[in-house]
Structure formats: structure tokens, C-alpha cells
Image (cartoon, grey):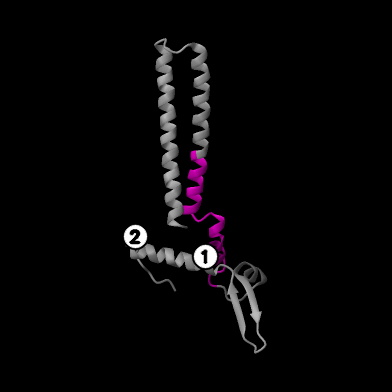
């Protein structure tokens, strides 16, 4: 999870909420103008339908963004799939084909017998460690050593 992604999504959610509120105020003003006789029935019906459609569209967009934020904060994104693999194989005692496929990018055997194993999610893991470290440095979370 990237804090920048979360902040961007929170900003988009706030923008959507403001847009929805603005449309609701316009719709209320339209009704007031219609009630006072300032707006004819056909104009009221047309603009009422437009505002209703726009509010529905903004609400749907808001829901999609909120779901995306929920997915990120609950580690349910494709970017965080690697965490599920790490949890699945935590404490593994022997390698299975499934574990190798899900956790290892490549295995290179050199002429001198040296073997090099490249983890599939090394970059993701390092990014997560840096992110957690930054939260710890800012005092947002308490640093703990997990063995």
C-alpha cells in the first residue's frame, strides 16, 4: 500500500462528495424556483432529470473509488497478492511446486555449482519494508521485530 495512493483516493472521494453536494443544492434550488413559478414545468422536468442522472453517476463513481480505497487499505489489490502468498507459506518446512511457482522468480545454477535464487516479489517486499519503516520513523506505528 502506498500512502500517496491512499491520499489521492481520499482526495478524489472528497471531490466526489463535494460534487454530489453541489448537485443536490442545484436540484433543491431548481425545486424552489419551480415552486415559486420562476421555472416552467417542462424546464423543471428536464433539469430535474439531468441533475438526478448526474447525482447517480457521481454516487456510482464515489462508490467505485471508495471500494478501491477499501481494497488498498485491506490489502486486497493485485499489488498485494504477494502478501497472501507469504502468509500462505509462512513457516514452510519443505518446498512444493506450488510454493516455488508462487514465490520464486528464477533459479540459476552456475558452472561452479553456485545456485542463485531470485524471489518473485523481492521489490514488493522491499517497498513494504520501506513503507513500514517510514511509518515507524514518523511515529505512526510502533516498531517491532518479528521473527
Q: Residue furthest bottom?
A: 112
Which is nearer the eye, 104 or 15?
A: 15
Where in the figure is residue 138, as x and y percent of width and height? 33, 62
| Residue 85, quarter of picture | bottom right
Secondary element at image label 2? loop
Separation of residues labelled 1 and 2 (CA atoms): 21 Å
Which image quarter holds the C terminus? bottom left
The label number, if any, that marks residue 140 in the structure image: 2
- Does residue 132 appear to the left or right of 61 in the view shown? left
Q: Earlier in the sequence, mark 1 or mark 2?
A: 1
Where in the figure is residue 7, as x and y percent of width and height? 42, 50
The label number, if any, that marks residue 124 in the structure image: 1
- Count numbered badges in the picture: 2
Residues packed near mark 1 inside 10 Å, few (<14), some (14 to 19) or many (20 plus): some
Secondary element at image label 1? helix
Seen at 54% across and 58% down, the residue is: 79
What stretch of residues is rendered in magenta?
A: 62-91
| Residue 141, quarter of picture | bottom left
Amino acid at each position: 500500500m502506498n500512502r500517496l495512493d491512499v491520499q489521492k483516493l481520499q482526495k478524489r472521494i472528497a471531490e466526489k462528495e463535494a460534487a454530489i453536494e453541489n448537485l443536490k443544492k442545484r436540484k433543491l434550488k431548481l425545486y424552489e424556483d419551480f415552486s415559486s413559478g420562476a421555472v416552467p414545468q417542462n424546464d423543471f422536468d428536464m433539469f430535474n432529470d439531468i441533475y438526478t442522472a448526474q447525482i447517480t453517476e457521481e454516487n456510482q463513481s464515489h462508490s467505485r473509488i471508495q471500494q478501491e480505497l477499501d481494497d488498498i487499505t485491506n490489502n486486497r489489490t493485485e499489488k498485494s497478492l504477494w502478501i497472501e502468498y507469504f502468509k500462505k507459506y509462512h513457516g514452510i518446512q519443505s518446498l512444493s511446486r506450488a510454493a516455488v511457482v508462487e514465490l520464486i522468480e528464477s533459479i540459476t545454477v552456475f558452472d561452479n555449482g553456485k545456485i542463485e535464487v531470485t524471489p518473485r516479489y523481492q521489490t514488493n517486499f522491499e517497498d513494504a519494508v520501506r513503507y513500514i519503516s517510514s511509518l515507524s520513523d514518523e511515529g505512526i506505528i510502533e516498531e517491532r521485530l518479528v521473527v
